Image (cartoon, grey):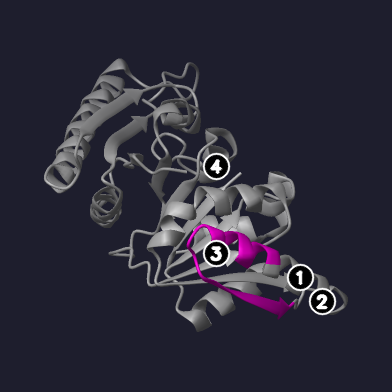
Amino acid sequence: MNCKSLMVHLELGRPNANLLRITADLAERFDAAVIGVAACQPMQMVYGDGYVSGELIEQDRSEIALEMKKAEAEFRGVLAARAPKLSWRSTEMYASLADYLAREARCADLVITGVSTGDLFDASRAVNTGALVMQVGRPVLVVPSAVPELKLERVLVGWKDTRETRRAVSDALPLLAQAAHVSVVEIAAEEDMTDARARLADVASWLLRHGINAEPVVARSTNDDATRLSAIAQEQGADVIVAGAYGHSRLREWALGGVTRDLLLRTDRCSFVSH
């Protein structure tokens, strides 16, 4: 995959400085054009006991327009001198914000978004990251607000022998090629350790043919793969985890917890996911 077009999603009403700095760094690394995008649901008029006056609705729309202008100014201010081409898209809509972003991503190689602070509670401002990953048909880099830069010193690939993981690693090839150290980690049950080593040897050989020298690591399962993977990433000092998203059903992952849910909500490192 070439990485010549980035789409960065700015969430209105919150700081996006670190997200934009990381986007600018990637734009310079790949000489990539950048599309900035923001979306918001306006206040809806409700009849009955919950009636909202027209005056409040107009005030809400004025605030949204102001926030859109601020977001665009922040986007252009950070990226103007660091990307070969910039464009901006924004909208107010009553439909799902994830739907809008997924449609606009038709012209992007990689979608960059923050860790949403309101997936379940504020659909008017926050994009449901899980829904976006499922719909977008592009890899998504999830950037926590507290991460100031994308070092790419150490990248960890969380391997499962699934379609989603194969796609994620293929999508991540440009990123992996930039990394100083790449490890491919599979968490396996005791009886599956030998087969896991054979699988990772195949993956490492494939990556080497793409010029990427990767260290295979097989780790014994502790029945909590998300916690185990996070601990290994911590031990290795990983800057980014690459993984396939939602190998199980999305509902099951969000209800019971899972690797994808952990990656989308992490606040200490970036996650690169594909579905």
Q: Amino acid at mark 4?
A: Val
Q: Secondary structure at mark 3?
A: helix
Q: For numbered disc 2, what is the local secondary structure?
A: helix
Count of labels shown? 4
User: Disc 1 and disc 3: Cα gap in Å?
Assistant: 15 Å
Residue 117 in view in this figure? no
Secondary structure of residue under mark 1 = helix
Q: Spatial distance from mark 4 to mark 3, Cα to Cα?
A: 28 Å
Q: Is residue 80 visible?
A: yes
Q: Position of residue 230 (x, y in %)?
A: 57, 73
Out of 85 and 143, give the one closest to the viewer.
85
The amino acid type of the residue labelled 2 equals Thr
Task: Provide the residue designation for mark 2.
Answer: 194
Viewport quadrant of the C terminus: top right
In the image, what residue occupies the spot 72% across and 52% down? 162
Instruction: Estimate the spatial distance between the alpha carbons at disc 2 and disc 4, rounded to whole Å.
Output: 32 Å
Residue at mark 2 to residue at mark 3: CA–CA distance: 21 Å
- Which circle marks residue 133 in the picture? 4
The answer to the question of whether label 2 and label 1 lie on touching residues, with beta carbons closer than 8 A, is yes
Q: Nearer the viewer, mark 1 or mark 4?
A: 1
Q: Which mark is residue 198?
A: 1
Would you name the residue on which mark 3 appears?
208
What is the span of residues highlighted in magenta in the rendered image? 202-220
* For the residues bearing labels 1 and 4, Cβ distance under 8 angstroms: no
- Counting other residues with Cα less than 10 Å from the Cα at mark 2, is it few (<14), some (14-19), or many (20 or more)? few
